[in-house]
Amino acid sequence: MFKWISPRRLNEIGILGMNGRNIDYIGRYNDRSLYPLVDNKFKTKQMAQKYKVIAPKLHGVIEHQYEVKTLVNLLANKEGFAIKPARGSGGKGILVITGRKGDCFVRASGKEMTLESIERHVTNVLAGLYSLAGAPDVALIEDLIQADPLFDKYSYQGVPDIRIIVFKGYPVMAMLRLSTRVSDGKANFHQGAVGVGLDMATGKAAYAVQFEKRLEHHPDTGQVLNDIEIPNWSDLLLLAAKCYDMIGLGYLGADIVLDKDKGPMLLELNARPGLSIQLANGKGLLPRLRQVEALEETHMNAEDRVAYVLKSLK
């Protein structure tokens, strides 16, 4: 949407660029010593448990190659689960099992896997095949998220998630990411998922794009995107705001999913959230960031910060 607009015009409408994000916000407000708390999903989950932030239940951790053979017992009687690399990024290495068929496990795509195939996948995780910089990693086995049926008609296969940018503890911008056929059922925006900008006061859809082009309907399901409204919106904002108290990073991205039984759950945090959320919203981040920076006194608790956002952010 913005690629044909002049730099002067981008500045006028408040678009935050890469240099501005890295220097003025990440560099200024994110203490690098805190990065491991978000770059390592195992540490994030441990912090979430400590601060009572709701996240998918952890069933087990495989840290060493000799533990791979314990999977047969760890996965026994589990119909659905997810295996994730603790230091993965961009959804790489995440294996989602939705059921069983005889001795095989069934993936979200319908493809079947043997236990031996899962063991090889975990071995690859431990070797760092999916981790940042290829560093040795650990594998997390988590509860399978039961996506809220609200999104069934808006998303192709995968589980939608909601990215919320949190600045100094204030949720300032949000987008819903809907998987598509092109994105292979994943909610990764850069792979072709639909990004739906959300009104911060109501949680209603305000804008939508795919591959930088504005959309009115989901490209696969044909559903009208403007009809989307996130239920219990303030609960999502509160969950995101509490992540600031939990981690301490001044500028972060919180990825949240809606489970049909457990409600909003924290999926993961990002210390370097991308800027495409501005595309999904059709507006820039800078006015909202500057509004929060200009506050003479910041609110001490998450509830008060969310109340301010619902009332004051435009």
Image: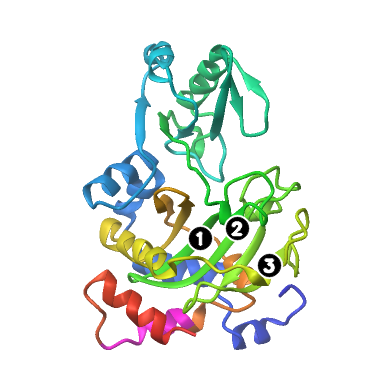
- Residue 225 is tagged as 3
Q: Which range is magenta?
A: 288-296
Measured Cα–Cα span from mark 3 to mark 1:
17 Å
Measured Cα–Cα span from mark 2 to mark 3:
12 Å
| Residue placed under numbered mark 2 in the picture | 177
Residue 248, given in percent of the width and then of the height, sits at 28, 60
Q: What residue is rendered at 39% in x and 85% in y?
A: 311
- Residue 52 is tagged as none
- Residue 197: say if magenta: no
Please name whichever residue, 293 or 27, is drawn nearer the observer in this view of the structure.
293
- Residue 163 is tagged as 1
Name the secondary structure under disc 1. Answer: strand
How many numbered callouts? 3
Which kind of residue does numbered mark 3 sit on?
A: Leu
Q: State which tag comes first along the sequence, 2 or 3.
A: 2
Residue 191, given in percent of the width and then of the height, sits at 69, 50
For mark 1, does the 10 Å Cα neighbourhood hold few (<14), some (14 to 19), or many (20 or more) residues? many
Q: State which tag comes first along the sequence, 2 or 1.
A: 1
Residue 170, given in percent of the width and then of the height, sits at 36, 73
For mark 2, does the 10 Å Cα neighbourhood hold few (<14), some (14 to 19), or many (20 or more) residues? many
Q: Is residue 207 above or below residue 26?
A: below
Q: Are marks 2 and 1 in contact (CB under 8 Å)?
A: yes
- Residue 294: say if magenta: yes
Residue 26, given in percent of the width and then of the height, sits at 42, 65
Q: What residue is rendered at 47% in x and 34% in y?
A: 84
Name the secondary structure under disc 2. Answer: strand
